[in-house]
Amino acid sequence: MRPQTNLVALAGYALCGCVSGDGKDDIIVVGNPPSSMVAALAPSTSSTTPPVVPIAQAAVLDCEDGASTLFEAPTSWTWDGEDELTLPEGDWCGLVISVEDSVVLEVQGESGGEAALEVPVYRVVLSTEDAASLADLGWWLEVGTPGFLDEDRLGIEDGSSLTVRSSECASTTVCVAVMDEIEHASGLYEDRDGDGALSDSERESGARMAGEDL
């Protein structure tokens, strides 16, 4: 099992700029990271417009004491498999991406159904039991799990439309499920062949860092 005892606390701590009891800031900003990560929604039978995601902060978590290291991230990050986010060198046991505002998803089903969701994602938290070195490799963040935006999952398989605003998400079962998938079921995979895509075999090899179990 993944170490989840203090993961939520660490996630919040990673992004609050907290100061330790001795007065020293526990968060260190680093630069010149050597490798890159792209993100894309998990594959679906529906057609989905890649969302442009507003990023607040990004941090990696130390394996020894859970200390957080912020690293430079763009203010917006398109989840299209092409927009790169650079990663800091080192061995880490967690990755936290904090989202500034709602993620807007536009989905077109095979039967003509449509969905427009404003999903209030707060942060994507990934972790691993064993330290992961983020140097010298290309990384693929698969957001959600395959099929989580299929038209049957969204309830638009009959050609209907679904619109959910951010303020309505908490009371809409479908929107809550999508939010949970993004925040807790995403995974960080190695692009082993360096082709800038996540193949079935790379996915089947397992995520190097994974979200919490739902």
Image (cartoon, rainbow, N blue to C red):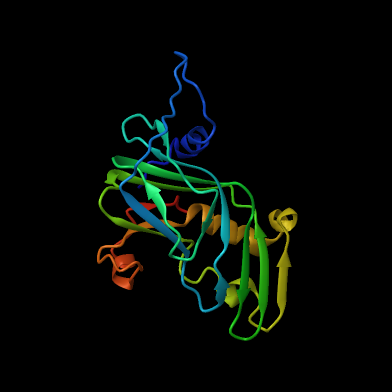
Q: Where in the figure is residue 63, as x and y percent of width and height? A: 32, 36
Q: Quadrant of residue 48?
A: bottom right
Q: Is residue 12 left or right of residue 60?
A: right
Residue shown at 25%/66% (left/top)? 193
Residue shown at 37%/38% (left/top)? 31
Q: Where in the figure is residue 139, as x and y percent of width and height? A: 34, 57
Q: Is residue 53 above or below residue 130?
A: below
Q: Is residue 146 in view? A: yes
Q: How many marks?
A: 0
Q: Is residue 214 in view? A: no
Q: Is residue 75 left or right of residue 20?
A: right
Considering every residue shown, the one lying at the far top of the view is 22
Q: Is residue 127 left or right of residue 14?
A: left
Q: Is residue 17 above or below residue 52?
A: above
Q: Quadrant of residue 67?
A: top left
Q: Where in the figure is residue 183, as x and y percent of width and height? A: 52, 52
Q: Is residue 105 above or below residue 132?
A: below
Q: Quadrant of residue 162?
A: bottom right
Q: Where in the figure is residue 169, as x and y percent of width and height? A: 69, 57
Considering every residue shown, the one lying at the far bottom of the view is 111
Considering every residue shown, the one lying at the far front of the view is 32
